[in-house]
Image (tube, grey):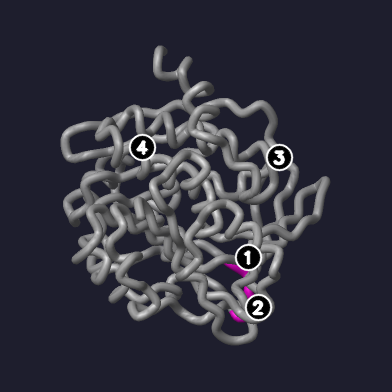
Amino acid sequence: MEIVVAGHLSRDLIITPNTTKEALGGGTAYAMLAPSIGAFGAGIVTKVGTDFEQSYRDTLRSSGLDLSGLLTEGPKSTRFVNKYDTSGARVQYVEALAPPIRPKDFTDDHLEANVIHFSPLTAEEISTECIKQARSSAALTSLDVQGYTRSIDRSGVVTPKNWTARDEILELVDVVKFHVSELFATVRAESELSAASQILSLGPRVVLVTHGQRGSVIYTRNSQVKIPLVLARVQADTTGCGDTYTIGFLLEYMRSGDVRRAGLFAATCASFNVESVGPYDMPTRSMVESRMRAYIQA
């Protein structure tokens, strides 16, 4: 397989000022982008409960994903409630959590993937031993830190937290993705460049920092590349934009080795994501390349 994405799927409830809808969620769901843009095999490693709808299984299977790592354990799947106000600000609640993902949940086929990307929704979701295992086998390991910068109180409300126990994990990954707020919750620094430099010193080769409407910046040990926001035709839902960005980047970076091209490809994938609710209407590679052409030439 070219890419494997590990992390919990979620039965998301998305509430906006205009709509209320349940959708398949979690960074792992957005792995459906990979086969759509032509990945040479893509799979997931995840845990769900017996309450996980058959329609979601059918959607994942029809996307072309390998589902040998879709494991059912216990009665409850992870469930997040995402409530957005008119400005796009989000309040999150957790109603249930599936069991953690362990090294034994990965098959030999998963571990032979070119890229293994970890996208945990919560801090205890993926055993560090899983990342160590991937590090010893995959060509490229990647992490979205979102779950490590979340705290869940007794009532299920999700709030930001500082990620201090970071070093052991970051030294195991080649690519790490932060929203800018997560970056400053991970390191104390006076500037974004200084914070990214600290992360690079811990082991990663590439640091992705997203800024929402202000685009993103990609840092390597000898470059800093600014990626503009790629405009969507309409804006329906921003959930999953960071996930599609990262998956798009990883696949294009592995193929081209060009950080700027991979960043523009990633931003264009994210622009398609905001045009619908949930991870359902993924673009093809030709659609992505057509939209990003003007940005490549700029």
Residue 102 is marked as: none
Image-quadrant location for residue 172: bottom left
Q: Which amino acid lies under the numbered mark 1 shown in the image of this protein?
A: Arg
Q: Earlier in the sequence, mark 2 or mark 1?
A: 1
Task: Identify residue for label 3.
Answer: 236
Closer to the camera in the image, 148 or 284: 284
Of badges 3 and 2, the one in the foreground is: 3
User: Is residue 78 depicted above or below 210 in this figure?
Assistant: below
Closer to the camera in the image, 107 or 175: 107
**Residue 240 x %, y %:** 56, 49
Of badges 4 and 2, the one in the foreground is: 4
How far separated are the C-alphas under marks 1 and 3?
A: 24 Å
**Residue 210 x %, y %:** 44, 41
How far separated are the C-alphas under marks 3 and 4?
A: 26 Å
User: Is residue 155 depicted above or below 149 in this figure?
Assistant: below
Report the span colored magenta. 154-158
Q: Are marks 3 and 2 in contact (CB under 8 Å)?
A: no
How far separated are the C-alphas under marks 3 and 2?
A: 29 Å
Task: Identify residue for label 2.
Answer: 155
Q: Earlier in the sequence, mark 4 or mark 2?
A: 2
How far separated are the C-alphas under marks 2 and 1?
A: 29 Å
Task: Identify residue for label 4.
Answer: 252
Task: Identify residue for label 1.
Answer: 57
